[in-house]
Image (cartoon, rainbow, N blue to C red):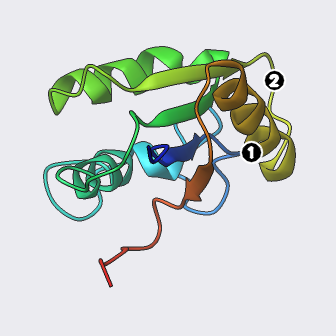
Amino acid sequence: MNTPLVPVILCGGSGTRLWPLSREGYPKQFLRLSGETSMLQQTLQRLTGIEALAPALLVCNESSRFIVAEQLREIGLNNARMVLEPMRRNTAPAIATAALQAIQQGDAPVRQLSWRRRYRPL
């Protein structure tokens, strides 16, 4: 039996790269820069229909959880899971936290996806 891959998406940041559009409380992946959906929503939509994937695991700061939940609701995604960080800790600790969470729930392996890039099937 194959274990499904757990897509991990990091949802947070300092909000400085696209200031003043983005800010600490509303980082760039939540913005709707190219179309009617945000970069986070577009990343999640690209996962639709890919076989052997577990529900997405989103790592976000506690202060972003309502934004993430609303963006999930807007695209009709109700099976994604969230891991809440009490404070921003950067990429490596966030990915490690997601991997530990996946292992504790019996899932593995994980694959961190960037909302910046578009992945195409081989």
Residue at the disc numbered 2 = 87
Residue 95 is drawn in which quadrant? Answer: top right
Measuring from the top left, give residue 104's x and y in whole percent: 71, 20
Question: Residue at 71% across / 45% down in the picture?
Answer: 14
Decide: marks 1, 2 in contact (CB < 8 A)?
A: no
Would residue 68 be visible to someone looking at this image?
Answer: yes
The tag on residue 38 is none
Residue 21 as seen in the image, left or right of residue 48: right
Residue at image position (26%, 19%) is 78
Q: In this view, does 118 lie above or below 69?
A: below
Residue farthest front in this picture: 1
For label 2, the crowd category at 10 Å Cα-Cα, with few meaning under 14, some 14 to 19 and many 20 or more, is few
- Provide residue 117's location: percent of width, then percent of height: 44, 73
Q: How crowded is mark 1: few (under 14 residues within 10 Å), some or many (20 or more)?
A: some
| Element type where label 2 sits in the image | loop
- Position of residue 24 in the picture relative to residue 80 (left or right): right
Amino acid at the residue labelled 1: Ile
Q: Nearer the viewer, residue 21 or 6?
A: 6
The three-letter code of the residue at mark 2 reads Met
Q: Quadrant of the C terminus?
A: bottom left
Quadrant including the N terminus: top left
User: Residue 64 location, x and y as percent?
Assistant: 55, 23
Report which residue position mark 1 lands on.
95
Relative placement, left or right, of 47 versus 30 is left
Viewer-proximal residue among 97 and 6? 6
Q: Tell me if residue 68 comes above or below residue 27 in the rendering.
A: above
SS type, badge 1: helix
Residue 106, relative to residue 32: is it above or below? above
Mark in the foreground, 1 or 2:
1
In this image, 13 relative to 38: left or right? right
